[in-house]
Image (cartoon, helix red, strand yellow):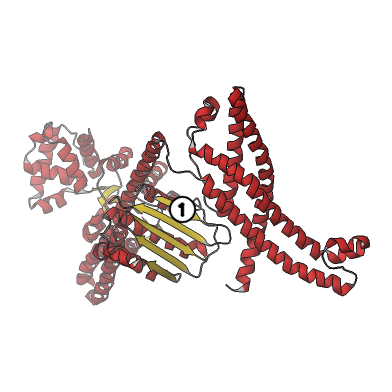
């Protein structure tokens, strides 16, 4: 990685990372308090009086966890969500809500975050403090001569030594920044591991989710049909009418100005070709012929080859031997790749991209990565919303990770249903 | 004459411009979306407007709505509406104000340049040009349960052509019969359908369409 790229990544992310670390120190210390409260409450539950306190403490716990989830989402550029069993379970039936895996995970997280997280944050912040100390050595030496031995390891008693210390301080600062960025990321990734629960989603909620995705799939389908109808009428049909119009003009010209006819015939043929071209594009948009004839792998190869941004491709070879997924799944996978590559070319500012495709018996997983500026969002008309809907219709998952400064990674998994 | 064209497909728009300029008309403006259409119609006040029903941005019936509004402000502004498919509601909306200077043709008819140019001339002169497809839809709807069933086959053909806005000589020519027979048929249609006789072409169409829509 070139030095400029390195410094861009390091200092671009440092402010966010230090903010995260400082916040974590705060929530870590507060978390210790909440944890202590929780233990006391649970102990009091043995005598009975704790049940009155439990809802309050659980709500507090959840608030801290939710707050932290938002921080983690922000830092990682990907949504961190969890499913609690019912919103008001904590207030009405605190004992039941203790059985909720999400609540239990929150408790585990709280303990880990308070002890381990706080230690990490203290280490990161003191590293920064050290850097500041070294950097300001000349200041200390001039302003508080008596403290000069205490500030840093070496005794600063001359200008050369003072500036030497400053130089060391610069190196120290770079290392400290790297440590802070790395620690923040490690902390966020660890937190995400604990704070995300997807397993054992209640059936009722699952049904609701499926109804929503089904409705969205139908909407998407409807919009697609309308688009096709419009493209046919306003593109292909109008093109053919234009050809017919020219033929009519030729018929008139045959009588009045026969010398112009050859030229008009040429122009008309061109029009016919344009109309055919628009028809061909339309068909390709409905269901790419290459997908029918050659399968998903070749279709994705064709997509990457056509992309404006140089795109490398990584396809598992023995996937070719696997049976072909249902056509609808293949088509969805194809459009995910197509949409993702369009985004890379249009918005990312990247100069290279990677498509990784894994076709398993149970699912197709797609990974599209670029080295662009990141900060991709679902709401900026980037088509990610469409991808998510399309994938959700197959009960698949979509994950977009795109912190400011990049890289952007889109991961999609679509079950084949086999 | 001065003509305004509203069509979003560039190929077709250019084709129309070429055709009409070749015929010695002046194209005073071309519009490719629904938003600009009404202001353009009001500003240029063309001798005739050729308008696609469906235009951007919403691709519904912008063209038609703009035309209806323009004709409210400039009564009898001659418009020839082109549509990808026949929709009785559209025809009804157009004719609701007045049948003079109105045409409603399937877009495909543009290819038959003679008919298209003739229809354009007719509406510019205050006449009517209804697509045979529209008329046959209207006729089918009414067949079987009303006085239309009392008409002979030949009388139905004459009625359809009348409703399209054709003049008696044209009807005679296209049915290969003498003009006097056309007159005779029309008289008999008016009697059977109990329509008031009138000399003016478009009023005749209006009467026929009003009856067919009833």
Q: Is residue A385 visible?
A: yes
Q: Numbered disc 1: what chain?
A: A
Q: Is residue A322 left or right of residue B132?
A: right
**Based on the displayed image, in which of its 4 quarters is residue B13 positioned?**
bottom left
Q: Residue A312: x, y in percent?
A: 42, 70
Residue B142 pos. (x, y %): 16, 35
A403 displayed left or right of A146: left
In front of the other: B59 or A192: A192
Q: Is residue A178 left or right of residue A159?
A: left
Q: Is residue A79 above or below residue A263?
A: above
Please tell me whether residue B186 is drawn above or below residue A399 in the rendered image. above
Residue at (19%, 48%) from the top-left corner? B132
Residue nearest the viewer, comparing B86 with A96: A96
Q: Residues within 10 Å of mark 1 (few under 14, many from 20)?
A: some
- Which residue shows up at 27% across the image and 55% down it? A327
Give the quadrant of the N terminus of chain B.
bottom left
| Secondary structure beneath label 1 | strand
**Quick one: quadrant of the C terminus of chain B?**
top left
The residue that disc 1 covers is A399
Please name whichever residue, A2 or B115, is drawn nearer the observer in this view of the structure.
A2
């Amino acid at each position: 990685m070139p030095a400029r790229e390195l410094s861009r990544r390091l200092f671009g992310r440092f402010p966010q990372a230090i903010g995260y670390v400082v916040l974590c120190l705060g929530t870590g210390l507060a978390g210790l308090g909440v944890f202590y409260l929780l233990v006391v409450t649970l102990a009091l539950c043995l005598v009975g009086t704790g049940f009155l306190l439990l809802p309050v403490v659980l709500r507090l716990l959840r608030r801290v966890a939710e707050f932290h989830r938002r921080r983690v989402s922000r830092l990682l550029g990907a949504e961190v969500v969890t499913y609690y069993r019912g919103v008001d379970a904590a207030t009405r039936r605190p004992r039941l809500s203790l059985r909720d895996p999400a609540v239990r995970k929150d408790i585990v997280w709280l303990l880990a975050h308070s002890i381990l997280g706080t230690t990490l944050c203290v280490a990161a912040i003191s590293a920064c403090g050290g850097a500041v100390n070294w950097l300001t050595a000349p200041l200390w030496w001039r302003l508080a001569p008596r403290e000069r031995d205490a500030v840093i390891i070496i005794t600063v008693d001359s200008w050369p030594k003072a500036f030497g210390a400053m130089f060391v301080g610069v190196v120290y600062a770079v290392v400290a920044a790297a440590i802070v960025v790395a620690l923040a990321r490690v902390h966020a990734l660890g937190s995400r591991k604990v704070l995300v629960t997807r397993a054992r989603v209640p059936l009722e909620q699952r049904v609701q989710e499926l109804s929503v995705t089904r409705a969205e799939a139908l909407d998407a389908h409807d919009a697609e049909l309308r688009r096709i109808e419009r493209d046919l009428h306003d593109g292909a049909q109008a093109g053919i009418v234009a050809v017919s119009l020219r033929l009519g003009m030729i018929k008139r010209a045959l009588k009045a100005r026969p010398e112009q006819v050859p030229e008009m015939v040429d122009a008309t043929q061109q029009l016919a070709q344009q109309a055919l071209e628009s028809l061909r594009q339309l068909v390709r948009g409905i269901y790419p012929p290459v997908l029918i004839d050659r399968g998903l792998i070749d279709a994705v190869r064709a997509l990457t080859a056509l992309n404006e941004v140089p795109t490398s491709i990584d396809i598992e070879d023995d996937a070719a031997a696997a049976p072909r997924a249902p056509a609808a799944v293949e088509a969805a996978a194809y459009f995910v790749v197509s949409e993702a590559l369009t985004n890379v070319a249009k918005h990312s500012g990247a100069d290279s991209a990677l498509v990784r495709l894994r076709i398993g018996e149970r699912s197709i997983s797609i990974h599209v990565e670029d080295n662009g500026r990141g900060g991709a969002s679902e709401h900026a008309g980037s088509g990610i919303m469409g991808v998510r809907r399309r994938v959700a219709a197959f009960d698949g998952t979509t994950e977009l990770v795109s912190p400011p400064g990049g890289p952007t990674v889109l991961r999609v998994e679509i079950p084949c249903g086999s | 004459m001065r003509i305004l064209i509203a069509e979003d497909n560039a190929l077709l728009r250019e084709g129309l411009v070429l055709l009409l300029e070749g015929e010695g008309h002046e194209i005073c403006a071309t519009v490719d979306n629904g938003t600009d259409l009404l202001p353009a119609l009001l500003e240029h006040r063309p001798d005739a407007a050729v308008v696609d029903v469906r235009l951007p941005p919403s691709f519904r019936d912008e063209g038609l709505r703009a035309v209806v509004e323009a004709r409210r402000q400039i009564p009898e502004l001659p418009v020839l509406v082109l549509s990808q498919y026949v929709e009785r509601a559209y025809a009804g909306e157009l004719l609701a104000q007045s049948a003079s200077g109105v045409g409603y043709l399937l877009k495909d008819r543009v290819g038959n340049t003679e008919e298209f140019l003739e229809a354009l001339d007719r509406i510019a002169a205050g006449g009517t040009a209804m697509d045979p497809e529209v008329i046959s839809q209207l006729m089918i709807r009414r067949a079987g349960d009303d006085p239309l069933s009392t008409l002979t086959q030949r009388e139905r053909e004459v009625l359809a052509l009348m409703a399209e806005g054709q003049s008696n000589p044209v009807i005679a020519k296209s049915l290969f019969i003498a003009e006097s027979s056309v007159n005779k048929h029309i008289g008999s249609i008016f009697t059977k359908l109990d329509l008031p006789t009138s000399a003016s072409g478009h009023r005749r169409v209006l009467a026929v369409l009003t009856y067919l829509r009833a």
